[in-house]
Image (tube, rainbow, N blue to C red):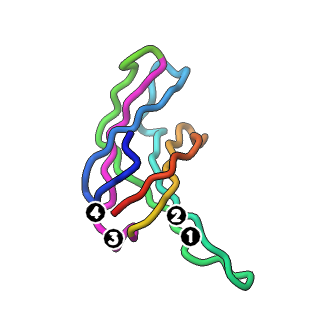
Amino acid sequence: MTTQLKYGEKVMIQVRSPQFQLDKTKLQVTMYSPPFTTHGISINQRLVQLGIVDVNRNVFPGIHNIVATEPPSGNIAPPGYYMLFVNFNGVPSVAVWVQIK
């Protein structure tokens, strides 16, 4: 997966899972913009859920490819760094840092 993202494009995310089948209805791809804190106030926290286009199951045993659509513009996700998560059945993955511009 590339860590440089562009608005409106599709991105392929590869995940490992012991699950033989990934149920698309239990799957989410999210980008989280971590906040910054000043004077005890937390500012700029943002969570964006990406649209899932396709799930290619078991491209290799235990490896799945997820195709997701990036946010359409900076109005939804301002340019910057985000932590990208894949959530399956309510359990988040380890985050990957990405930059969108």
Q: Position of residue 20 (x, y in %)?
A: 48, 18
Q: CA distance from mark 1 to mark 4?
A: 19 Å
> Position of 86 compared to 79: left or right?
right
Q: Which residue is mark 1?
A: 45
Q: CA distance from mark 2 to mark 3?
A: 13 Å
- Indicate the secondary structure of the residue bearing disc 2: strand
Q: Position of residue 93 (x, y in %)?
A: 57, 40
Marks 2 & 1, CB-CB < 8 Å contact: yes
Q: Please state the extent of the stretch shown in magenta in the rendering.
A: 62-78
Q: Position of residue 78 (x, y in %)?
A: 39, 71
Q: Which mark is residue 72?
A: 4
The residue positioned 52% from the left and 63% from the top of the image is: 33
The residue positioned 53% from the left and 42% from the top of the image is: 87
Q: N-terminal of the two: label 1 or label 4?
A: 1
Q: N-terminal of the two: label 2 or label 1?
A: 2
Q: Along the line of sight, which residue is nearer the eye, 15 or 55?
A: 15
Q: Position of residue 69 (x, y in %)?
A: 30, 50
Inspect the magenta stretch and tell me whether residue 91 lies in it. Answer: no
What amino acid type should be assigned to the residue bearing mark 4?
Pro
What amino acid type should be assigned to the residue bearing mark 3?
Gly
Q: Which residue is mark 3?
A: 74
